[in-house]
Image (tube, rainbow, N blue to C red):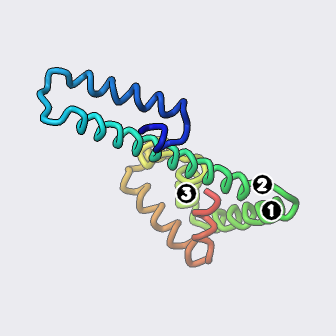
């Protein structure tokens, strides 16, 4: 039955073994229909197998798309450099502390608490600086760029 459902003898053998192991682990349980129980276990093992395969295919597709997106060619290199320059110019226009907090949070990827300790501020103040930075950058039309790059 496992072979009919998967078409792969190796996978079918593994599923059959897992099925029998699951059934054996329930050996003390009385069953009204032991064959029906084994078929249910087998069906669930086959479904689990296909879920696993589908997840692997999905992850591979995402990796392929990510590699295509990240593929660098002269045009994308130029665009990336221009975006980096625009972002750094915009951050330089932020108020001093606000810019420092933003750089530490988004570029160095520190937590609010780590930024607060590093700059000697409270966590609440760090959060307020971040809200202000995001608001100011969005007014400059660079909010999407900030989230895209960082």
Q: CA distance from mark 1 to mark 3?
A: 25 Å
Q: CA distance from mark 2 to mark 3?
A: 28 Å
Q: In the image, which disc is placed on residue 130?
A: none
Q: Residue at x 56, y 54 (%)?
A: 106
The 10 Å Cα crowd at callout 1, few under 14, some 14 to 19, many 20 or more, is few
Q: Residue at x 66, y 68 (%)?
A: 90
Earlier-in-chain disc, 2 versus 1: 2
Which residue is label 2 attached to? 71
Q: In front here: 134 or 146? A: 146
Compared with 52, 14 (above or below) is above
Local secondary structure at mark 2: loop
Whole-percent x, y for residue 61 in the image = 62, 53
Quadrant of residue 1 in the image? top left
Q: In the image, which disc is placed on residue 102?
A: 3
Local secondary structure at mark 3: helix
Q: Residue at x 71, y 52 (%)?
A: 67
The nearer-to-camera label among 1 and 3 is 1
Local secondary structure at mark 1: helix
Compared with 9, 113 (above or below) is below
Whole-percent x, y for residue 146 in the image = 60, 64
Whole-percent x, y for residue 141 in the image = 61, 77
Which residue is label 1 attached to? 76
Earlier-in-chain disc, 2 versus 3: 2
Compared with 61, 40 (above or below) is above
Mark 2 touches mark 1? (CB < 8 Å): yes
The nearer-to-camera label among 2 and 3 is 2
């Amino acid at each position: 039955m496992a072979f009919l459902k998967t078409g792969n003898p190796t996978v079918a053998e593994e599923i059959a073994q897992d099925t029998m192991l699951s059934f054996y682990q329930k050996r003390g349980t009385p069953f009204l229909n032991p064959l029906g129980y084994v078929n249910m276990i087998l069906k669930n093992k086959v479904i689990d197998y296909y879920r696993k395969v589908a997840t692997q295919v999905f992850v591979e597709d995402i990796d392929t798309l990510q590699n295509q997106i990240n593929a660098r060619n002269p045009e994308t290199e130029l665009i990336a450099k221009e975006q980096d320059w625009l972002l750094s110019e915009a951050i330089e226009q932020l108020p001093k502390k606000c810019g420092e907090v933003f750089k530490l949070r988004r570029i160095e990827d520190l937590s609010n608490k780590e930024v607060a300790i590093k700059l000697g501020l409270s966590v609440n103040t760090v959060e307020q600086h971040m809200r202000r930075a995001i608001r100011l950058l969005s007014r400059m039309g660079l909010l999407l760029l900030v989230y895209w790059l960082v």
